[in-house]
Image (spheres, helix red, strand yellow):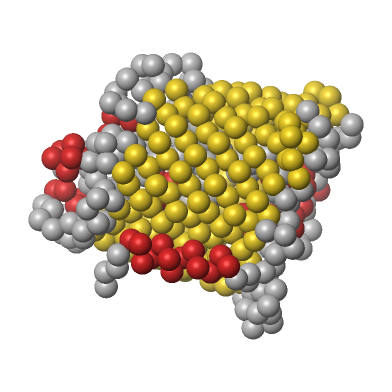
Amino acid sequence: MTFKAPTLFSLIFLPLFFTAKSWGRPEYAAQTHIVNCAACHATPYGGGPRNLNGKLFGTRFDKLPWYAQQPYASLDVRGQTYSAQRTPPETSQSKGLMLMSVAPTVMLPLSADSNTDPMSQLILSYSFAPVGNSMREAFLLHRLAPSSEKSWFSSILIGNFTAPFGLLTDEHRTYTRQMVAMTNRNFESGAVLSGDPSYLVHYDLAISSGFSNGGAGTNTQPNSWASFAHIRHQVGAIPLHIGLSGALAGTSSAKENLTAASLYGVLTLDQYTAPLFHGNIQMEAVTASGWNNSAFGTTSGDGIGYFIPSTATTWQTALTDSRSLGITTLVAWDLNRRWSLQYKRELFVPDTNFNGDYFYRNGGGFKYFFGATGSVTIRYDRGEVTRPGLTKADLAGSKAVGETYFALLHLWL
């Protein structure tokens, strides 16, 4: 079954005009009507380490262990077992067990009006896992106004951070994250200014010394820089968040500046459907120009190389300055506070001027929360590409093509 990109875009974003309550992560914000993610996370735009409020809210009504009931430290552990069969079947297969993240984080208040709401805070996080062994978040966060008040200038963040772009999720495999190399394992080095001009609006403005520099102190792309803008809106009393992000980056290896934009929505669906249905929908569309430049990828293998391997040199070269489109939708049906069924649909069009070539992937499975500090996700997905004439060698190197069975164990303290 095939489809046109504009048709899928309409089908995904029409539900944004309907609505919601549920359990989840980005959907927590929609449920509680909180647009400043610093209520639960170390950063005002979400993702990364959680503070004490985030730990408590993520328990799903279980009791948080005594050693986690403090605001000064947290731990994130992720392990995955998987079996990936590339397409066609006889070309490539990989399987194994990986420890993806063992990341302790310290959150040190430098000044505070209370232990749970410091005005200045130092956040340091490092992953000791064999995969991605490196410094992660490392920044100073200073509140310019108390977190409970409206302010055009709420906080400033300086250091090493994830980019405030699009819908931040746990899965680095997501097409809309891969196409612009902005997954949860890529980091910027610079500063972020955030504001909350109303209780329904939050914005972030960021500039970094080099895209996905990661604070390593070196830059593999000469004359590299990046800037980001992000705004999120809570739609009145409806448990629905919509967000818009933009990114502008430059490097000497690109002929023109690279641009990207993200439109996303998160809503819960049981306000009008309970008790028959409890769940949520997360949707994102990303359009980008120039990000298909293979020289602008990252050491973690994100970017165009995730879709088109280096062996397909002619195709990669033709896409260097093209405009691309990615669309992701995730539907979660919460059977109860422990079990959640999931369905995920993804699309990536490398060149919007030629919609005949695109990647798409379907996946389904479940997520089980076995306590206040742990979950396991088990899913099967299958990715395909419509471009004719690709050789076996071309397809064997594409991580976006083929079928994958995986189980992701996630523990946090």
Q: Is 38 on the left-hand or right-hand side of 289?
A: right
Res. 379 image quadrant: bottom left
* Camera-side residue of 239 and 362: 239
Residue 269 in the image, given as x and y percentages of width and height: 63, 71
- What residue occupies the far bottom of the structure in this picture? 276
Q: Which residue lies at the image location 77% right of the left edge and 48% below the top edge?
A: 199
Give the mark count. Answer: 0
* Camera-side residue of 140 and 318: 318
Residue 79 in the image, given as x and y percentages of width and height: 50, 49
Q: Is residue 102 above or below residue 221?
A: below
Quarter containing the N terminus: bottom left
Residue 354 in the image, given as x and y percentages of width and height: 22, 53
* Camera-side residue of 294 and 203: 203
Q: Which residue lies at the image location 47% right of the left edge and 36% below the top edge?
A: 247
Res. 221 image quadrant: top left
Q: Which residue lies at the image location 74% right of the left edge and 34% below the top edge?
A: 152
Res. 27 image quadrant: bottom right
Residue 339 seen in the figure: no
Q: Is 315 on the left-hand or right-hand side of 213?
A: left
- What residue occupies the far right of the structure in this picture? 113
Q: Is 331 on the left-hand or right-hand side of 237?
A: left
Q: Which residue lies at the image location 29% right of the left edge and 68% below the top edge?
A: 3
Residue 96 in the image, given as x and y percentages of width and height: 36, 51
Q: Is residue 375 above or below residue 160?
A: below
* Camera-side residue of 47 and 241: 241
Residue 140 seen in the figure: yes
